[in-house]
Amino acid sequence: MAELSKKGYQAEDVHGALMQADDFGQGDFNSPDAGYNQGFASRNGSMGAQGYSSGMQGMPMQQQQEMPRMSKQAGSSSDESNIYERIEEIVEGMIDEKWDELISEVKKIIQWKDGVEEKQAKLANDVEKLKEDFKVLHEGVLGKLEDYDTRMRDVGTELKAVGKVFKDVIPEFVENVKELKGIKESWKK
C-alpha cells in the first residue's frame, strides 16, 4: 500500500481494490481473472480481515480506523484492472531490480574468473620458462662434467707415462748418484 500510495494512488482505492481482489480471488473461479486473483490471494496469505488486521499493526491508529471505512467502498472494474496493472508493474520493477543485482554479481564473478585465468596463464608461462632454463643449466653442467672427465683421463694417462719414465729413470739415477758419491770420495782423498 505504501508503494502504491507513493505512486499517486489514494489509500482508500488501494485498500478497496485489495479487499475486492481478496474477495474475488477466493470466490468465483469461472471468471477470466479468477486464477490470477486466487494466486494473488494465496501468495499474500489470504488478505481477508484477519490478514489485514495483522498487517495493520505497523500502521498509525488513524489509518487503522480508516481501513474498515475504505473496505466498504468498492472500486470499479477499471480501478481493479489499474490495480492489477500497477501490481504487475511493481512486481516487474522488483524483478528487474533483482535481475540487475544478479547481473552485477555475475559480472564480478566473471571478472574474478578472468583474473584467475590470467594469473594461471602467467604461472604456466613462468613454469615453462623455468623448465627451459633448467634444461639449459642441466646441459651446461653435463658438458662441464664431461669436459672434467676427459681432462681427468688425460691426467691419468700422463701420470702413467710419468710413472713409466720414473720406472726407467730412477734406477739409472740411483746408479749415477752412487757414481757421483764415489767421485766425490776420490776427490777428497
Image: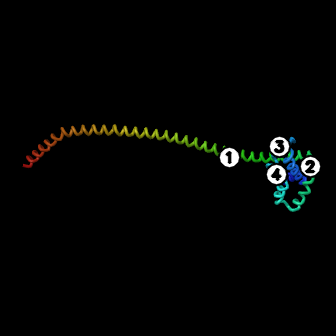
Question: Which amino acid type is shown beneath numbered disc 2?
Answer: Gly
**From mark 1 to mark 4, how far is it between C-alphas?**
40 Å
Of callouts 4 and 3, the N-terminal one: 3
Residue 63 sits above or below residue 153 on the image: below
Q: Which of 74 and 157 is in front in this view?
A: 74
Question: Which amino acid type is shown beneath numbered disc 1?
Answer: Lys
Helix, strand or loop at label 4? It is loop
Nearest to viewer (mark 4 / mark 2):
4
Of callouts 1 and 3, the N-terminal one: 3
Label 1 Cα neighbours within 10 Å, binned few <14 / some 14-19 / many ≥20: few
Question: Which amino acid type is shown beneath numbered disc 3?
Answer: Gly
Of callouts 4 and 2, the N-terminal one: 4
Image coords of residue 145 (percent x, y): 37, 40
| Relative side of 181 to 21, left or right | left
Helix, strand or loop at label 1? It is helix
**From mark 4 to mark 2, how far is it between C-alphas?**
19 Å
Q: Which mark is residue 35?
A: 3
Nearest to viewer (mark 2 / mark 3):
3
Q: Which residue lies furthest to the left in this view?
A: 189
Identify the residue shown where x is 61% and y is 44%: 116
Q: Name the residue under label 4.
A: 46
Of callouts 2 and 3, the N-terminal one: 3
Figure quadrant of residue 77:
top right
| Relative side of 163 to 65, left or right | left
Identify the residue shown where x is 41% and y is 40%: 141
Q: Residue 108 carries which label?
A: 1
**From mark 1 to mark 2, how far is it between C-alphas?**
47 Å
Q: Residue 75 carries which label?
A: 2
Of callouts 1 and 2, the N-terminal one: 2
